[in-house]
Image (cartoon, rainbow, N blue to C red):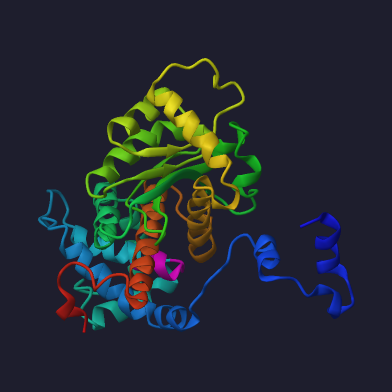
């Protein structure tokens, strides 16, 4: 379509001049957006109810040994601490305003803490600082992705930053300033294209380079998922990463950098990757690389629903807080997939969810 005709379509005041053919309309709207609001309404209305059920069932699959580790005994075992931290992040309230949510979970037999006193909010903050929770939280993220193992085959990788205090600019504005990034917590994730599920995630200091997490994310996800394609931006481009994906029979779509050598290459995984990317560019609106936008959408989902500001004051607590938010995001994705009909209810205990 010519530029003049496109301009007339958007700005003319005469409706009779805007009668375009179906092919011309599709050229303007490159991506058709399909939303089934009946499914969205069902999943979001009943999400808080199903959240507790899925969280409880997933934590039970961890088989945590809740014996005390010596010293002064805690008021709650590790499994209860994980539930309390995740419930706090899901409702996105301060510790004091989270006490009612803990009481609600306790009355519905999801928590079994002996007593919820007026000063219980201090315990909630202490639980978030427990460094023993971190490996269990990462494992819980992986467990929550398992129901979609047969559903997801293509993944996107990216990293983003979360603020440690209000008033700081959005991460996208300072992402190239390594000095400014020290005031942020880095989050590195791999995301399923269809469901936005996160099979694994790493939390780091804000200035750590994204490419350090490319191989671990691939290998951790490959343990459970059959990965066919990977999409990432140029920060993840490296010979070792391309060779790893080639050995695992994974197609990579990563754009070359300005100084990338693209001519005079012999047959190699690197040359195959470069050729694949440039052939993909010729497909126009059918390009595969554009699917990388799903990882950006996932970060937007987490930050818009659970905020991009971390409340905790210590490094361990911030790490646990961010992992809890990813757990909450995965549960939301599972609930939506369930109402959409993509999966039966997870964890092989569907009878307990009726």
Magenta stretch, main secondary structure class: helix
Q: Is residue 229 magenta?
A: no
Residue 267 occupies which quadrant of the picture? top left
Residue occupying the point 39% across, 21% down? 268
From the viewer's side, name the closer residue of 190 and 302: 190
Residue farthest along the right direction in this orientation: 13
302 over 339 or under it: above or below: above
Q: Is residue 271 toward the left or the right of residue 59 in the image?
A: right
**Residues drawn in magenta:** 87-94
Q: Is residue 51 toward the left or the right of residue 68 in the image?
A: right
Q: Quadrant of the N terminus?
A: bottom right
Q: Is residue 193 toward the left or the right of residue 346 in the image?
A: right
Residue 331 coordinates in the image, percent (x, y): 34, 66
Residue occupying the point 34% across, 34% down? 245
Residue 193 coordinates in the image, percent (x, y): 42, 55
Can residue 103 be seen here? The reply is: no
Q: Quadrant of the C terminus?
A: bottom left
Q: How many marks?
A: 0
Residue occupying the point 26% across, 51% down? 133
Residue occupying the point 46% across, 66% down? 94
Residue 75 coordinates in the image, percent (x, y): 21, 63
Residue 196 coordinates in the image, percent (x, y): 41, 59
242 over 206 or under it: above or below: above
From the viewer's side, name the closer residue of 263 and 325: 263
Q: Is residue 91 magenta?
A: yes
Can residue 32 be seen here? The reply is: yes
Q: Is residue 44 toward the left or the right of residue 87 in the image?
A: right
């Amino acid at each position: 379509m010519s530029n003049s005709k496109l301009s007339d379509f958007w700005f003319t005041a005469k409706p009779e001049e805007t009668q375009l053919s179906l092919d011309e309309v599709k050229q303007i709207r490159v991506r058709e957006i399909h939303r089934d609001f009946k499914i969205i309404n069902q999943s979001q209305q009943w999400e808080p109810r199903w959240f507790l059920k899925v969280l409880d069932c997933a934590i039970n699959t961890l088989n945590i040994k809740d014996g005390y580790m010596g010293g002064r005994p805690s008021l709650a075992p590790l499994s209860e601490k994980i539930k309390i931290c995740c419930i706090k992040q899901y409702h996105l309230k301060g510790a004091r305003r989270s006490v009612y949510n803990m009481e609600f979970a306790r009355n519905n037999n999801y928590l079994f803490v002996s007593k919820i006193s007026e000063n219980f909010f201090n315990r909630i903050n202490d639980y978030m600082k427990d460094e023993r929770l971190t490996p269990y939280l990462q494992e819980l993220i992986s467990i929550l992705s398992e129901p979609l193992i047969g559903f997801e085959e293509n993944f996107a990788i990216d990293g983003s930053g979360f603020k440690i205090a209000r008033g700081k600019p959005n991460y996208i504005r300072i992402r190239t300033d390594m000095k400014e990034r020290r005031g942020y917590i880095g989050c590195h994730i791999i995301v399923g294209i269809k469901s936005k599920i996160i099979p694994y995630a790493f939390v780091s200091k804000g200035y750590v380079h994204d490419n350090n997490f490319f191989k671990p994310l691939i290998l951790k996800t490959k343990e459970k998922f059959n990965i066919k394609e990977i999409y990432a931006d140029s920060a993840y481009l490296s010979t070792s990463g391309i060779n790893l994906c080639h050995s695992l029979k994974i197609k990579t779509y990563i754009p070359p950098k300005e100084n990338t050598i693209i001519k005079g290459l012999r047959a190699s995984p690197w040359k195959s990757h470069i050729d694949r990317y440039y052939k993909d560019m010729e497909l126009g609106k059918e390009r595969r690389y554009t699917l990388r936008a799903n990882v950006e959408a996932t970060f937007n989902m987490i930050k818009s629903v659970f905020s991009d500001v971390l409340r905790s004051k210590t490094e361990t607590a911030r790490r646990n807080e961010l992992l809890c938010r990813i757990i909450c995001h995965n549960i939301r994705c599972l609930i939506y997939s369930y109402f959409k009909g993509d999966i039966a209810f997870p964890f092989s205990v569907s009878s307990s969810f009726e």
